[in-house]
Amino acid sequence: MAAALFSASFAARAANAPEPAKPVIVVLGDSISAEYGLPLDTGWVALMRQRLTDERIDYSVANASISGDTTSGGRARLPALMQRLKPSIVIVELGANDALRGVPLSTTEDNLRTIIEQAQQGHAKVVLVGMYVPPNYGPDYTQKFHGLYGELSKQLRVSLVPFLLAGIADKPDMFQADQIHPTQQAQPVLLNNVWPAIKPLLRTSSPH
């Protein structure tokens, strides 16, 4: 009798147990991921959240992007995000503002490396989002800047999005008046550029 009561009580408790929390994707980015100049929830990160829902892939998305952020800012912010959210995937979309501010390439590289390593130490998979800077920075700087992303992705074995703005970079009508920030119409293209790097990392069903 006692055993029956115990098992009934255990079953009741199990039935009332909270659902396990969804795994979390954190996007650590700058204005391009922070919906600068766009209506709320129309940027590529919001579209990714919607696509996960549509495809019944059970993740929550935390957009930790801040307009104007640099790799130094992301590096400073990540430890608290890792501790609070315990993400399973971290998407790193930073670096362009370093170039705009004249930050040395070595500093940008060191910050990105540290961000990736911090995420990996927290057991997160990393997607590194590559960027180019405008050609007026000079071909040498432009190539070295873009090359950082590929090198880090190889060295630290993380997924790479070669260029976030691929497919729109040469289309002025896909950018807002500042010719820096993509329009709302461009956001699905950005998501399609990122998605192939994210999709293989997603857990699409419960582990057996």
Image (tube, rainbow, N blue to C red):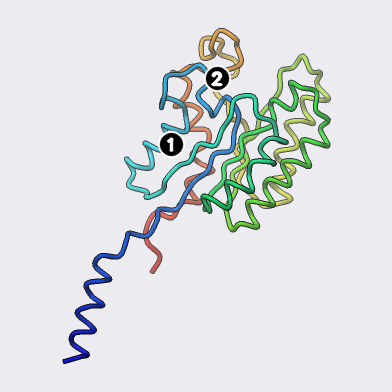
Which residue type does callout 2 highlight?
Ile
Secondary element at tag 2: loop
Q: Is residue 7 left or right of residue 106?
A: left
Asked which quadrant contains residue 77, the reply is: top right
Quadrant location, the N terminus? bottom left
Q: Residues within 10 Å of mark 2 (few under 14, many from 20)?
A: some
Q: What residue is pinned by disc 1?
A: 48
Q: Is residue 158 left or right of residue 108?
A: left
Seen from the viewer's position, the closer of residues 126 and 162 is 126
Q: Is residue 133 left or right of residue 186?
A: right
The residue drawn where x is 37% and y is 62% is 206
Q: Residues within 10 Å of mark 1 (few under 14, many from 20)?
A: some
Q: Earlier in the sequence, mark 2 or mark 1?
A: 1
Quadrant location, the C terminus? bottom left
Seen from the viewer's position, the closer of residues 101 and 7 is 7
Eye-nearest disc, 2 or 1: 1
| Whether residue 1 is situated above or below residue 141 in the rendered picture | below
Asked which quadrant contains residue 52, the reply is: top left
| Whether residue 5 is situated above or below residue 45 in the rendered picture | below
- Marks 2 and 1 sit apart, C-alpha to C-alpha, by 18 Å
The residue drawn where x is 81% and y is 36% is 107
The residue drawn where x is 49% and y is 50% is 200
Which residue type does callout 1 highlight?
Met
Q: Which mark is residue 168?
A: 2
